[in-house]
Amino acid sequence: MFRVRLGINGPLVSEICFGSLAISPLQGRVSADEGRDILRYAFAKGMDWVDTAEIYDNYVQLRPVLIEYPEAKVVSKSYAVTAKELEQSLEKARRELNRDVIDIFLLHEQESHLTLKGHAGAWEALQKAKTSGQVGYIGISTHAIQGVRAGALQPGLDVIHPLINYQGLGIIDGSLEEMLESIKFASELGTGMYAMKVFGGGHLAREPEKALEFIRGIRGINAMALGMSSQQEVDFNLALLSGTEISEELRHAVIFREKKLYIADWCQGCGECVTVCPQKALSIKSGHAFVQNEQCVLCGYCGRACVHFCLKIV
Ligand code: SF4
Ligand code: SF4
């Protein structure tokens, strides 16, 4: 598979990073064993890095595959705020993933310079961990235009994992054009970047060629994390990327497989999604969004209303 360098000084990696949220217990789409087999299959097909996070709760799931593929790189993320929290978080990742060095470690969801300022203790500890060799490269993930800009200016930062897709779905603080400007700015400073939510959390999956072409056309985006929960999805994404003809059978199996609306555990019950559902399929029950599947037509409108990216069609 085509390999790329993340930024000026970052690691060499395959253009697709295996997004492991899709096989994690958080989404519950496959069993732990099935998820491991899908990751093995992706590695065997040439993907050479996997994206996870402490909140995905799947370090132990990934561990056996990482032992089999010691050359594969791992990215993880942490919501740590203080130095002590970061140290604990990194220690947990190293222990549970069975890795002395975490290749890339990110502060999760940094939305502006104020968020980063509030995480100064964690950032300092991350820099120390890089100096001592416990981490290869450091950075942030973000859904925000201001997050990308602040990350680019953060001393010592190597990598940003920004949310970007051709409709700008999920960008929390402005337009798609503004996000592209921020990405350009970060790129000019030599920052490595790999995209998240390329298919808009499933809402853009009906036009996969368009979604991928858009990402590949952005100067400064070196690679992308794609969530995959079946071997067919791995084959489909590899074919998309290489421009190989995709059989109707495979296209149908991946794009038109049975789908449902998934509501993430971190839903905050704000009710924004309820107000936009044309089918009146959503309600709030016990502080959490609830979908009446029989009424849901999978139109995807609700996904755009949730700034926390809780809603996906899976
Ligand atoms: S908009 Fe998102 S956070 Fe708010 S209730 Fe709906 S799913 Fe939950
Ligand atoms: S996908 Fe469409 S119909 Fe289903 S809950 Fe969301 S807005 Fe309503």
Image (cartoon, rainbow, N blue to C red):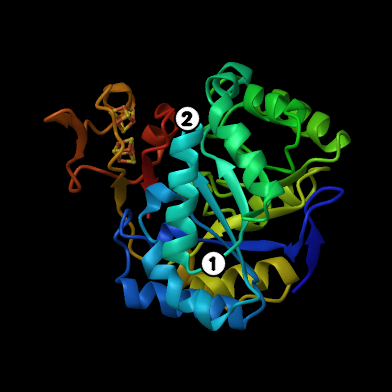
- At horizontal 66% and vertical 45% (from top left) the residue drawn is 138
Q: Closest to the observer: 256 or 211?
A: 211
Q: Secondary structure at mark 1?
A: loop
Residue 299 versus residue 178 in the image, above or below: below
- At horizontal 31% and vertical 59% (from top left) the residue drawn is 25
Amino acid beneath label 2: Val
Where residue 308 sits, quadrant-wise, is: top left
Q: Quadrant of the N terminus?
A: bottom right
Q: Closest to the observer: 135 or 172?
A: 135
Q: Which residue is mark 2?
A: 81
Local packing at callout 2 (Cα closer than 10 Å; few below 14, some 14-19, many 20+) is some
Amino acid beneath label 1: Arg
**Residue 45: x %, y % from top left:** 63, 81
- At horizontal 53% and vertical 20% (from top left) the residue drawn is 118
Can I make out residue 105 in this image? Answer: yes
Q: Is mark 2 within 8 Å of ligand 1?
A: no
**Residue 202: x %, y % from top left:** 47, 50
**Disc on the earlier residue, 2 or 1:** 2
Mark 2 vs mark 1, CA separation in Å: 23 Å
Q: Secondary structure at mark 2?
A: loop
Q: Which residue is mark 1?
A: 99
Contact (Cβ within 8 Å) of mark 2 with mark 1: no
Q: Quadrant of the C terminus?
A: bottom left
Q: Closest to the observer: 46 or 108?
A: 108
Residue 52 versus residue 142 in the image, above or below: below
Q: Closest to the observer: 242 or 100?
A: 100
